[in-house]
Image (tube, rainbow, N blue to C red):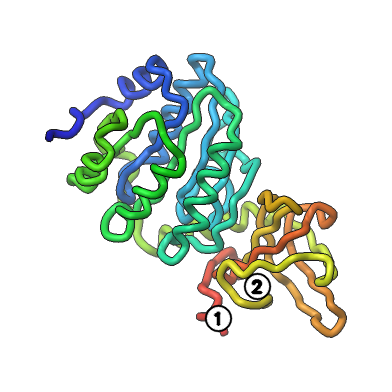
Amino acid sequence: MPGPAETSWSEAACRIADCGWRRVLVLGPSDAGKSWFCRHLCDRLLAAGRRVAVVDADIGQKIVGPPAAVTLCHARPGRDLFAARAERFAFVGATGPIGHFLPLVVGAARLVAAAQADVTIIDTGGLVGGPGFALKLHKIAAVRPDGLVAIDKAGELAALLRAHRHIPALRLAPAPEAGTKSTEARRAARARRFLQYFAEAAPIDLALAQIVLQPFGCPSLQPGLLCGVADGAGGGLGLARVEDVDEGRGALRLSTPVAAARIRILQLGALRIGHDGRDYRWEEAQ
């Protein structure tokens, strides 16, 4: 059965604005231009008077907020989506999905459900083949999109679209401006995002007895460890970096932009973050 015919970006945005889709999932391999299309679609929907939310489920190359978390923002006219601040977080603890499918899928579903908008745009990571096929199957089942946008480079999404031919889909050509990023360029982009986020952080002190530790990656507290911070209901508030652990005094110092009084849960990630923003798997920095 042939897949959907290729549609221009402008036509796709018009059709989405007119057809009543409330949840739009954007799929594609790395460097296809998913983020560029999300911004294009967001601007077109805002111009049409729609309330728009964006759930950024690409935990490595972010549109909204810092890496290692699924993030949510509500778009505003005149504000560049690429500069939007994350309003809600679902911590994953890593910048790649392998080994972290469950928090990624659960986090995306949770933030999509929390969006208050006429249209929610869901961006996804570039892993679509091999284990990425299973990830996308479960993500689609979890977020229940009304429509799919498939930005295909060389037929990578054909099998995924066949498996979801009951869901309306629009197929787009890649964005020329997306380009191909090297591994180092991707890492540098993550570092800039981490630095931007932690530029507003302040040191806070917590009593270990007053918080719940949840090992998402690292089994114990380590200096430099990236963590998620959450409230008592498990709602993600943001990220933190462990600065010091004094087990004798039962004390912990974090750097985070989140107020200490709001934090009840500390989710231990799988990364250490250097003061230059670079990320390392925690076991590599032992």
Determine the image quadrant of residue 224.
Answer: bottom right
Foreground: 200 or 163? 163
**The C terminus - image quarter:** bottom right
**The N terminus - image quarter:** top left
Q: In this view, does 204 lie above or below 8?
A: below
Whether residue 276 is visible to the viewer of this picture, yes or no, is: yes
- Counting from the top left corner in percent of width and height, residue 6 is at 21, 29
Q: The residue under label 2 is which amino acid type?
A: Gly
Q: Name the residue under label 1.
A: 285
- Counting from the top left corner in percent of width and height, residue 249 is at 87, 81
Callout 2: SS? loop
Q: Which residue corresponds to the image point at 50% horizontal and 17% vertical from the top-left?
A: 47
Q: Compute the Cα span from label 2 to label 1.
A: 9 Å
Q: In this view, does 14 lie to the left or right of 271?
A: left
Mark positioned earlier in the residue sequence (2 or 1): 2
Q: The residue under label 1 is which amino acid type?
A: Ala
Q: Residue 224 carries which label?
A: 2
- Counting from the top left corner in percent of width and height, residue 157 is at 24, 44
- The reply to whether callout 2 and callout 1 are in contact (CB within 8 Å) is yes
